[in-house]
């Protein structure tokens, strides 16, 4: 996204329209155009779950991209998303996919040592001290004397009480800058690091103005991912609970009829993914519309302002009133957003208030960032060692409860019929809360099965799961029932999960901004965290791009090789088990079905 060129609006001195905004996205790089949105793994009920069930959240931007976005072309009952012009992704292209090996892997050992390419290792270790930045550092555009408390910003008492109940006592920089501007009626562009409180920065002004003139539908908040929509709705519910604020979450994968009834009740705040919101607008009987919306918020605006969502955003902008307040919030500034900041305002509007974070380093200071050099075919062994022996700074966060016992097993144990756990199973100590990011859904499904076979409790979050399963996985992880969440990039944006100790990049993301969002799931709100990336022989260029983007060098980390190799046989057995289970689940077959459906849509043979 950073390599795209912004469209110069300075030459055209006229009012900014929805078409202008959509044109401000330059054609992405050729590799990004290979993204294809595919359906959820589990079929949904016909009729009740229809339309707009496309997956959201960019899951990969490399050779095996899978766009999980609730964007273009998502009116299909099985949840697929592939509009004309979007390439159909062949997920079997990656020759070294970890889950494609159904037999015992030959790990390439030489004298019981794992050899890492010397050229690659030296390239990373001997990088120049200062890389030329991909984008120039930005400075804040904010009041010189920012408010030091919410009360000084005029936040009413009911909202102050809600903030206190959330243990939020003082505003962050982005909140101090953006809340007064939004209350004053200005359009706003807010750029701040992950975990800095951007949601509250737009939720408080909306609720504050809503208290003065309550009606529905008052605000529309658009997000690129379903999970983020539910999270934002939770924060609105907590902040506005004492003043009876009604919210509705309108996303794919859920019962469309139930959502239509919610919209008929005119909720004050609608949090939606663009595709499903458009479907409801097209199918409404006229009992509601967006003609009186006061606020439009684009959260994770850098992701929304991409070609994936062009058609949906254009439709929504035409349905919204011209006099609305428009607010964009993002952790990564892109040329499209910069162009909007410099564009001439609409008639009757002033230029938007722009807040840019003062530091050029996109990641927080409390985050420790490491890489481990490892050949791609032995990552599983290293991952197992890392999870069983995490960094010392994360050990105090180990808090997963013991595995619950079933009554049947307990009864058989009394009779002496139950099998005793092996010594290796008994040795497994569950890791602290950890999110493992993969670039492909198949990798996420495979790793989840692998970790379970190794005795590590884990759950998956990816686009092939139904929405109910995805929410269930998040709930299990939030409640510490399982300590490991294996996720694609659908979980990289905006999710605020408390006490995440460690983020592991199983695959290095191709786009450096995705790295920023991934590692931003830990070290939030001033707390510490660790991010560890597995760097293989093919990732040198990606690491350099990431370091160039975040203006920080990743520190090398080594694991004791002899200790790693001790579990080689155990991991090899678990790999066979995981691959057999993945094969038995018909995961690959379902992928082929989705590809065929997406190909038909791309050729114009789309059916509802």
Image (spheres, rainbow, N blue to C red):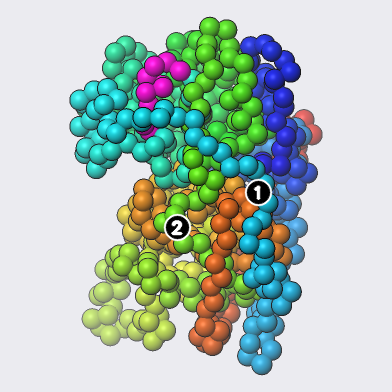
For disc 2, the marked residue is 367
Q: In this view, does 587 lie above or below 559?
A: above
Q: Residue 133 carries which label?
A: 1
Horizontal and vertical percent position of residue 166: 25, 40
Quadrant position of residue 184: top left
> Residue 178 lies in magenta, yes or no?
yes
N-term mark: 2 or 1? 1
Residue found farthest to the top: 348
Which of the two residues, 530 or 133, is positioned nearer the viewer here?
A: 133
| Secondary structure of residue under mark 2 | strand
> Residue 317 lies in magenta, yes or no?
no
Q: Which residue is drawn at 57% across and 61% down?
A: 553
Q: Which residue is drawn at 67% across and 46% down?
A: 134
Residue bounds of the magenta highlight = 175-186
Q: Residue at x 35, y 70 (%)?
A: 395
Horizontal and vertical percent position of residue 444: 56, 59
Q: Residue 81 carries which label?
A: none
Please give left or right for residue 155 compared with residue 114 in the image.
Answer: left
| Secondary structure of residue under mark 1 | loop
Tally of numbered discs: 2
Q: Split into 4 quadrants, where in the image is the C terminus?
A: top right
Q: Is residue 496 above or below residue 601?
A: below
């Amino acid at each position: 996204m950073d390599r795209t060129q912004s469209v110069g609006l300075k030459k055209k001195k006229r009012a900014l329209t929805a078409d202008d905004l959509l044109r401000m996205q330059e054609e992405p790089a050729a590799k990004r155009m290979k993204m294809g949105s595919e359906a959820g793994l589990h079929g949904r009920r016909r009729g009740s779950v229809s339309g707009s069930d496309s997956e959201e959240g960019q899951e990969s931007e490399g050779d095996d991209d899978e766009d999980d976005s609730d964007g273009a072309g998502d009116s299909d009952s099985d949840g697929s998303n592939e509009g004309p012009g979007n390439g159909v992704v062949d997920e079997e292209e990656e020759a070294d996919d970890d889950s494609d090996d159904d037999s015992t892997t030959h790990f390439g050992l030489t004298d019981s040592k794992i050899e890492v390419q010397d050229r690659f290792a030296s390239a990373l270790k001997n990088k120049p001290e200062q890389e030329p930045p991909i984008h120039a550092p930005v400075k804040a555009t904010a009041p010189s004397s920012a408010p030091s408390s919410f009360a000084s910003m005029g936040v009413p008492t009911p909202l102050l009480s809600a903030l206190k109940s959330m243990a939020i006592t003082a505003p962050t920089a982005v909140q101090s800058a953006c809340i007064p501007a939004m209350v004053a009626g200005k359009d706003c562009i807010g750029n701040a690091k992950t975990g800095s409180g951007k949601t509250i920065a737009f939720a408080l002004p909306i609720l504050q103005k809503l208290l003065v003139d309550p009606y529905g539908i008052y605000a529309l908040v658009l997000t690129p991912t379903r999970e983020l929509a539910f999270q934002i709705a939770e924060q609105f519910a907590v902040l506005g609970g004492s003043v009876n604020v009604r919210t509705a979450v309108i996303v794919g994968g859920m019962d469309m009829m139930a959502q239509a009834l919610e919209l008929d009740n005119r909720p004050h705040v609608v949090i939606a993914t663009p595709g499903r919101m458009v479907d409801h607008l097209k199918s409404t009987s006229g009992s509601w519309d967006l003609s009186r919306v006061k606020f439009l918020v684009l959260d994770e605006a850098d992701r929304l302002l991409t070609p994936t969502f062009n058609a949906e955003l254009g439709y929504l902008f035409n349905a919204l009133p011209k006099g609305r307040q428009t607010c964009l919030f993002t952790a990564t500034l892109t040329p499209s957003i910069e162009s909007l900041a410099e564009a001439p305002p609409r008639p009757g509007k002033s230029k938007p208030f722009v807040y840019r974070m003062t530091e050029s380093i996109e990641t927080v200071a409390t985050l420790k960032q490491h890489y481990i050099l490892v050949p791609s075919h032995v990552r599983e062994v290293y991952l197992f060692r890392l999870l069983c022996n995490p960094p010392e700074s994360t050990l105090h966060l180990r808090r997963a409860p013991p595995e619950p016992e079933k009554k049947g097993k307990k009864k058989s144990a009394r009779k002496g019929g139950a099998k005793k756990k092996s010594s290796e199973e008994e040795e497994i100590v569950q890791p602290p809360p950890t999110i493992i990011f993969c670039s492909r859904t198949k990798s996420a499904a495979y790793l989840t099965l692998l970790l379970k076979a190794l005795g590590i409790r884990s759950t998956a979050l990816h686009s092939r799961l139904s929405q109910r399963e995805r929410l269930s996985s998040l709930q299990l992880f939030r409640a510490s029932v399982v300590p490991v969440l294996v996720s694609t990039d659908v979980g990289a944006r905006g999710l605020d999960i408390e006490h995440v100790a460690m983020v592991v990049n199983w695959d290095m993301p191709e786009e450096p901004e995705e790295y920023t969002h991934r590692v931003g799931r830990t070290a939030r709100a001033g707390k510490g965290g660790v991010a560890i990336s597995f760097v293989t022989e093919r990732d040198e260029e990606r690491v350099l791009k990431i370091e160039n983007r975040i203006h920080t060098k990743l520190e090398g980390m080594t694991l004791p090789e002899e200790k790693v190799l001790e579990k080689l046989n155990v991991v090899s057995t678990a790999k066979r088990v995981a691959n057999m289970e993945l094969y038995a689940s018909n995961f690959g077959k379902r992928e082929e079905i989705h590809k065929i459906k997406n190909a038909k849509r791309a050729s114009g043979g789309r059916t509802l």
